[in-house]
């Protein structure tokens, strides 16, 4: 049996989720809370398997509740269930200890699957949230290092194995100009050689 608690300041939301969980096999709702203080107190006492947590609570942020509960109950799986879908809310929640993030437009039938997924070690997320996480991760993994368009072109040509002379001919510039751009590229990438620049560009997906 998977035990679950619900924290949400809106009664209709709490009631709707609770009714759905009552119909689910091997899932039991053992606590319902309308604010952060009662949620922390109740979850610490009940020690559920999964806690569904809203962010916009009247007395404190649900993210802070997650942080407190995760520190006190490391085995607790916390899933954010909120209307917020901005990057700050998503990543603050995950950093605080949430294992999943669902927006409130998720079908209640999907919520049951999310609860089971969390208990199985997964990280349930609404599709829009998963897309934002992946997009942010890709941005992190593919930094631009403030390269200009021309510097990006020179670095791309370099990674293709072209000589300085060929790069100059391809871009219709002098070899001195290519060397000038390379000097700036090395400085921005914090490398000291052609080989280091190529390796870093490849590893970090810069080109």
Image (cartoon, rainbow, N blue to C red):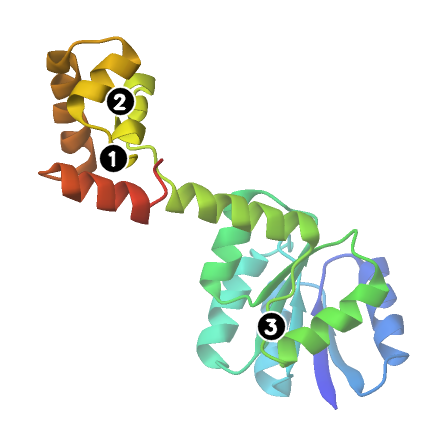
In this figure, which residue is indicated by the disc labeled 3? 122
- In this orientation, does residue 50 appear? yes
Screen quadrant of the N terminus: bottom right
Question: Mark 1 or mark 2, which is nearer the start of the sequence?
Answer: 2
* Residue at (16% x, 43% y) in the render: 196
- Secondary element type, mark 2: helix
Q: CA separation, marks 2 and 1?
A: 16 Å
Near mark 3 (Cα within 10 A), the count class, few <14, some 14-19 or many ≥20, is some
- Secondary element type, mark 3: loop
* Residue at (29% x, 13% y) in the render: 171
Q: In this rendering, which labeled residue sits more in front, label 3 or label 1? A: 1
- Secondary element type, mark 1: loop
Residue 79: image location, x then y, percent: 63, 66
Occupied quadrant, residue 142:
top left
Near mark 1 (Cα within 10 A), the count class, few <14, some 14-19 or many ≥20, is few
Question: Mark 3 or mark 2, which is nearer the start of the sequence?
Answer: 3
* Residue at (28% x, 32% y) in the render: 145
Q: CA separation, marks 2 and 3?
A: 42 Å
From the viewer's side, name the closer residue of 54 and 141.
141
From the viewer's side, name the closer residue of 154 and 59.
154
In this figure, which residue is indicated by the disc labeled 2? 151
Near mark 2 (Cα within 10 A), the count class, few <14, some 14-19 or many ≥20, is some
Task: Evaluate if marks 2 and 3 touch, with contact meaning CB atoms under 8 Å apart.
Answer: no
Question: Mark 1 or mark 3, which is nearer the start of the sequence?
Answer: 3
In this figure, which residue is indicated by the disc labeled 1? 161
Q: In this rendering, which labeled residue sits more in front, label 2 or label 1? A: 1
The image shows residue 120, relative to residue 126, as above or below, that is: below
* Residue at (46% x, 49% y) in the render: 137
């Amino acid at each position: 049996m998977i035990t679950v608690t619900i924290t949400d300041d809106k009664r209709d939301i709490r009631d709707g989720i609770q009714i759905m969980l009552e119909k689910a096999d091997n899932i039991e709702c053992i606590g319902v809370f309308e604010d952060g203080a009662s949620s922390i107190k109740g979850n610490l006492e009940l020690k559920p398997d999964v806690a569904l947590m809203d962010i916009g609570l009247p007395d404190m942020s649900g993210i802070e509740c997650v942080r407190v509960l995760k520190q006190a109950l490391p085995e607790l799986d916390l899933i954010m269930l909120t209307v917020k879908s901005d990057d700050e809310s998503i990543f603050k929640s995950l950093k605080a200890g949430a294992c999943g993030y669902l927006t409130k437009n998720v079908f209640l039938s999907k919520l049951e699957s999310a609860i089971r997924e969390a208990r199985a070690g997964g990280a349930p997320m609404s599709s829009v949230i998963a897309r934002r996480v992946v997009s942010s991760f890709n941005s992190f993994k593919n930094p631009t290092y403030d390269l200009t368009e021309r510097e990006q072109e020179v670095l791309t040509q370099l990674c293709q194995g072209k000589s300085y002379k060929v790069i100059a001919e391809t871009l219709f510039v002098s070899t001195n100009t290519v060397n000038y751009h390379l000097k700036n590229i090395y400085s921005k990438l914090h490398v000291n050689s052609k080989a280091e620049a190529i390796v870093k560009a490849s590893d970090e997906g810069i080109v």
